[in-house]
């Protein structure tokens, strides 16, 4: 395996052409669903750019941010949080046992960020002016969104650098790999710093919406809450995704990978349980501090409890229990519940509890849903394409072997 | 157009500052004195609901003029639209039918302008908060931030505008009063320096106890606005947003913006320190990938 990695292909052109060919049957259930959906989304996007946002979306004058921003951007970015947490654990704390998860998580983060930037463009009224905050004649430096945009952009670059050694290996260039590897620690430190700021920055976006967001969800702690929840949101995705990859890409794994995987997810569950506890605690403090406890008996209050107890407290206990008895099944269940909880939380803040008093309510059109899902589908296509070809999953075995054989 | 080196370096500097949030910290220029803004006082007790201000505004900006059906009627609440910058509504109150006028409040420290990442929304020194089509990305963060829900977005256009009252910025530059003020036959609208208008407003309240409720809406709302209102009844009765903060909205984000430079300096130092501290003996000296 290691030899195959280190041999440069004789002709790059031939190599790329062969790599573009599909590796498996195209007639899978996923493709049969995803291909028509994405095609339909393409048509919707064309309509959107000809007739304006209103032609495909239900966003209103009082709820100007709908599903595209609330789900693809605000929620999706939290799910991409696994990359900075894992790079922190491996490169900063030296927890080598999580190293096998790094490449796939960074790849996932990189794709997520790139696609959510794309989703943002769809939602902009004047996307051709997107260059303005970058070129300097119109820097809105007092804007949280300005900070988020810059940090977002730079983090995409940092993740590109973090992932680049894998691409060099795929292309068989050992020298490039070694040189790019040297940039890793810098990119990691820069990336973690940027993540801290833009994960919390996404929450800070809503600080000025005081009075528009239901008092149970509005808090001056929003930036901190967004940051902490991005830790367990990101790790839950790593756990959930890992268990699927373990099955789908089993041909790339060795016989010990299952065992190793279980050790890893138990460690990650600990981090999840503890960060969820911190989050839960902060939420309670916030409720007491803001005197919003009495609102819990209203209908919005019940909905709030569904989110907080059903999808934070219970999965937190499940994570802790799963670590104790060492059952991956319970941990997987906890990660799925956490993922649902994050979707609920982000959608609540940006859409559902935002102008909760407004009548009529904003309800997304079917077209908004199609585009939202299609963005995930296309992201998944590329993810799958890369996993089949580049040494993302299989690397850890071959890499450790290479390193060992080199002494 | 060429950019000389100095301009370029200045731009880079601003970029760096923006990145770390320093500019928000080190703003040495004091906030422009809110008292010296131009402002408009709307004495609601004098308003007759004739809509002349609405017509004048529509003419000034080339917007559709109100039709006969749009006549103020207390059973209908007409909203601001991307192509309707101001609106007169009739409200049934304890003292009978009262006419309210809604438009941008032109805050002293506007949430929309501080939210705008391209400076398309801008508080002009003379008072108006203006919108620049050439800079706007259409992200609608101004709409999320505005406590008065003023900026409106053209959802049915492929080159959308943000529609809102500009306080006739162009006319102000010529030394003229805004179109709505000029058009008002009842003298319910007065244009002038904000401090003068506040004096007039408070004097009217003092001289006519019973006529006015003792509150100038806009004096403290959102940290003070360039639009002031006097009313015969409490503003809540008229449907004004009485839940707005009394401090400027950009203050809500200040804590976060202040923390950005510290994170940018502290985090990398802390992370590198942690990395060194947690290295095991066997790793030291070895090529640590």
Image (cartoon, rainbow, N blue to C red):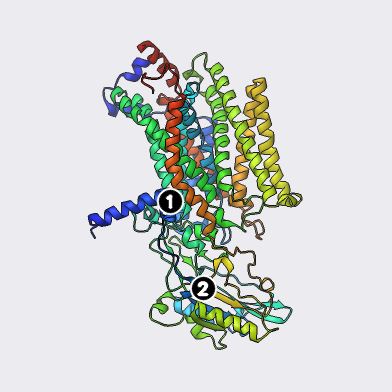
Which class describes the residues within 10 Å of circle 2: few (<14), some (14-19), or many (20+)? many
Mark 1 or mark 2, which has the lower sequence index?
1
- Which disc number belongs to residue B226? 2
**Chain under label 2?**
B
Front residue (pair A62, A213): A213
| Closest to the observer, B133 or A162 | A162
Query: Would you say the residues marked 1 and 2 are in contact, meaning their CB atoms lie under 8 Å apart?
Result: no
In the picture, which quadrant includes the C terminus of chain B?
Answer: top left
Element type where label 1 sits in the image: loop
Distance of label 1 from label 2 (alpha carbons)? 28 Å
Which residue is tagged 1?
A: B21
Height in image: B181 above or below B83?
Answer: below
Task: Give the x, y percent position of residue A269.
Answer: 60, 28
Q: Residue at x 30, y 22 (%)?
A: A174
Q: Give the x, y percent position of residue A92.
A: 45, 29
Secondary structure beneath dot 2 equals loop
Residue B162, numbered label: none
On the rendered structure, is B57 left or right of A275?
left
Q: Position of residue B14 (x, y in %)?
A: 35, 54
- Left or right: where A136 falls relative to B237: left
Q: Is residue A166 above or below residue A126?
A: above
């Amino acid at each position: 395996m290691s030899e195959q990695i280190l041999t440069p292909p004789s002709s790059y052109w031939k190599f790329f052409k062969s790599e573009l060919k599909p590796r498996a049957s195209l007639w899978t259930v996923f493709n049969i669903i995803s291909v028509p959906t994405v095609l339909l989304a393409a048509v919707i996007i064309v309509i959107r750019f000809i007739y304006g946002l209103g032609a495909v979306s239900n966003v209103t004058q009082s709820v100007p941010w709908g599903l595209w921003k609330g789900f693809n951007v605000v929620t999706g970015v939290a799910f991409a949080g696994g990359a900075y947490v894992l790079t922190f654990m491996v490169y900063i704390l030296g927890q080598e046992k999580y190293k096998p998860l790094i490449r796939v998580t960074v790849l996932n983060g990189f794709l997520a960020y790139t696609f959510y930037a794309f989703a943002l463009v769809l939602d902009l009224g004047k996307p051709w002016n997107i260059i303005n905050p970058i070129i300097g004649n119109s820097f809105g430096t007092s804007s949280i969104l300005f900070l988020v945009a810059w940090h977002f952009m730079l983090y995409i670059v940092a993740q590109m650098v973090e992932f680049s050694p894998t691409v060099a290996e795929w292309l068989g260039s050992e020298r490039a790999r070694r040189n790019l590897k040297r940039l890793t620690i810098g990119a990691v430190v820069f990336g973690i710093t940027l993540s801290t700021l833009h994960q919390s920055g996404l929450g800070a976006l809503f600080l000025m919406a005081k009075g528009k967001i239901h008092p149970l969800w509005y808090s001056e702690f929003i930036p901190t809450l967004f940051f902490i929840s991005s830790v367990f949101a990101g790790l839950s995705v790593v756990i959930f995704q890992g268990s699927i990859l373990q099955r789908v890409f089993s041909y790339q794994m060795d016989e010990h990978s299952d065992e190793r995987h279980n050790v890893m997810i138990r460690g990650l569950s600990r981090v999840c349980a503890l960060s969820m506890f911190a989050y839960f605690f902060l939420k309670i403090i916030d409720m007491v501090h803001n005197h919003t406890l009495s609102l819990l008996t209203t209908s919005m209050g019940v909905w709030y409890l569904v989110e907080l107890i059903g999808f934070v407290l219970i999965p937190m206990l499940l994570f802790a229990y799963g670590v104790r008895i060492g059952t991956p099944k319970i941990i997987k269940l906890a990660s799925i519940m956490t993922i649902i909880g994050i979707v609920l939380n982000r959608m609540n803040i940006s859409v559902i509890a935002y102008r909760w008093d407004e009548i009529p309510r904003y309800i997304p059109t079917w077209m908004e849903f199609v585009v939202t899902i299609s963005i995930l589908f296309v992201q998944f296509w590329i993810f799958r394409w890369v996993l089949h070809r580049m040494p993302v999953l299989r690397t850890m075995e071959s890499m450790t072997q290479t390193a060992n054989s080199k002494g | 157009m060429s950019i000389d080196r100095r301009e370029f370096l200045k731009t880079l500097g601003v970029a760096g500052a923006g990145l770390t949030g320093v500019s928000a910290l080190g703003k040495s220029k004091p906030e422009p004195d809110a008292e010296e803004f131009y402002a408009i006082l709307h004495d609601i007790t004098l308003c007759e609901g004739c809509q002349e201000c609405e017509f004048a505004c529509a003419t000034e900006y080339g917007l559709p003029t109100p039709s006969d059906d749009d006549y103020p009627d207390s059973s209908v609440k007409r909203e601001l639209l991307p192509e309707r910058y101001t609106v007169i509504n009739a409200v049934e109150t304890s003292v009978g039918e009262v006419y309210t006028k809604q438009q941008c409040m032109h805050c002293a420290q506007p949430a929309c302008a501080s939210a705008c990442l391209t400076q398309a929304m801008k508080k002009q020194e003379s008072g108006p908060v203006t919108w620049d089509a050439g800079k706007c990305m259409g992200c609608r963060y101004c709409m999320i931030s505005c406590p008065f829900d003023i900026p409106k977005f053209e959802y049915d256009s492929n080159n959308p505008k943000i529609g809102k009252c500009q306080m006739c910025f162009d006319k102000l530059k010529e030394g003229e009063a805004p179109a709505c003020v000029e058009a008002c036959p009842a003298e319910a609208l007065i244009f002038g320096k904000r401090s003068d208008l506040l004096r007039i407003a408070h004097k009217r309240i003092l001289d006519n106890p019973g006529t006015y409720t003792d509150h100038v809406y806009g004096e403290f709302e959102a940290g003070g606005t360039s639009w002031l209102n006097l009313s015969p009844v409490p503003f809540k009765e008229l449907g004004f947003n009485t839940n707005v903060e009394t401090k400027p909205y950009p203050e809500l984000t200040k804590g976060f913006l202040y923390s950005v430079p510290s994170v940018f300096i502290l985090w990398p130092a802390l992370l590198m320190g942690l990395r060194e501290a947690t290295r095991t003996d066997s790793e030291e000296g070895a090529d640590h990938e």
